[in-house]
Amino acid sequence: MSYAIIRNEKYNRTSLNGIYRHNERKNTSYTNKNINHKNTYKNYAIKRCDMSYLKKFDQIRQENDLKGWIKKNSNVICEYVITSDNEYFKSIGEDETKRFFETAYIFVKNYKNLGDKYILSANVHLDEATPHLHLVFIPVVHSFDKKSGKETDKICCSEFWKGKDSYKILQDNFHKYMIRAGFDLERGVERNRKNIPLEKFKEVTNYEMQEMFKDSKNLENEVITNDIEVLRTEYKRVIRKFNTLAKRYTRVKNVVEETMFKSEQTKAENIQLTQEIESLENENSYLKNFINKTFEYVSILFDFPIDRLKRLVKNFVEKRRNENEKG
């Protein structure tokens, strides 16, 4: 069973150099031991970026007059990692694998009316364990400005991914699109599926592996005979054992793939949450400072004690809150 996998990660400006050097293979050395440098020449770009991601981002932002309030920790870039499993790509061959990634690119271009111009780069990596596509884009939201009466485009990652089911909807749509394009794939693992505890995972895999090796012992004894009936019986027994082992292998493989996928997904979500918390803390600090400065200026302007002014504002806010609760 193979899955249509699409994952999303968000980055702020300070992170762009790192993903640029990895995706475009600009590093001289890599900690990722899965990279086979002998196959790096096989990598190719569906959309090539002719400069660093940071420069390209600034260029696209300026050329398209993109709106949006961007702070130091604001997420301004998203990256899809699109793939399936290695066995699937081997089974469909090189040409279909290429069509898989090109089809995925078209899906991203059309999803939420993003458009090709807001995609920075799309690189297919064939020098790692499993072929995959890194697609980097700006999360642009199309809206209508009532004041000017014109359509406006703005950078807003939180609005682009608005809603608790936004990733589920993405995976649903991606799977349906790939199925319609002729790729026989299951839907990727849902985010809300329960994680498999590590100890349970070890227990399951150890049990299955022990069963596999225990059953395989009978296959190691060679049967030497000229009796056709004995050979026929032995042949049927071997086929049954083979089918049993194949099913157990598939079960172990699915558990491992699902657990690894959830592990990567959880790690990405933790990074995202950490960034969001840091961003909220900075914004909260900024607002507190802004409010305190406002109190100071109003106090000086009207020659009014600042402590008394704060009490009046606090009483007013509490009064309004009580009125709203009653109403």
Image (cartoon, rainbow, N blue to C red):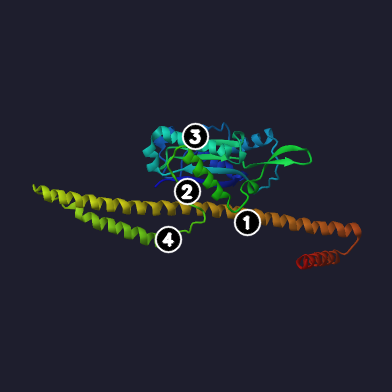
Is the Cβ of the residue at disc 1 closer than 8 Å to that at disc 2?
no
Residue projecting furthest to the right: 303
Along the horizontal axis of the image, is 155 left or right of 304? left
**x 39%, y 52%: residue:** 254
Marks 1 and 2, Cα distance to the nearest angstrom? 28 Å
Along the horizontal axis of the image, is 295 left or right of 267? right
Is the Cβ of the residue at disc 2 closer than 8 Å to that at disc 4?
no
Q: Nearer the viewer, mark 2 or mark 4?
A: 2
Labels 2 and 3: the sequence-earlier one: 3
What residue type is disc 2 on?
Answer: Gly
Labels 2 and 4: the sequence-earlier one: 2
**Where, by quadrant of the figure, is residue 68 drawn?**
top right
Question: In the picture shown, does residue 286 fall above or below 180?
Answer: below
What residue type is disc 3 on?
Answer: Glu
Q: Quadrant of the C terminus?
A: bottom right
Secondary structure found at label 3: helix
Q: Closer to the camera, 84 or 136?
A: 84
**Where, by quadrant of the figure, is residue 317 drawn?**
bottom right
What residue type is disc 4 on?
Answer: Leu
Q: Nearer the viewer, mark 1 or mark 3?
A: 3
**x 83%, y 65%: residue:** 316
- Residue 125: image x %, image y %? 46, 38
Marks 2 and 4, Cα distance to the nearest angstrom? 21 Å
Secondary structure found at label 4: helix
Along the horizontal axis of the image, is 66 left or right of 48? right
Secondary structure found at label 1: helix
Q: Which residue is mark 3?
A: 102
Q: Which mark is residue 277?
A: 1
Q: Nearer the viewer, mark 4 or mark 1?
A: 4
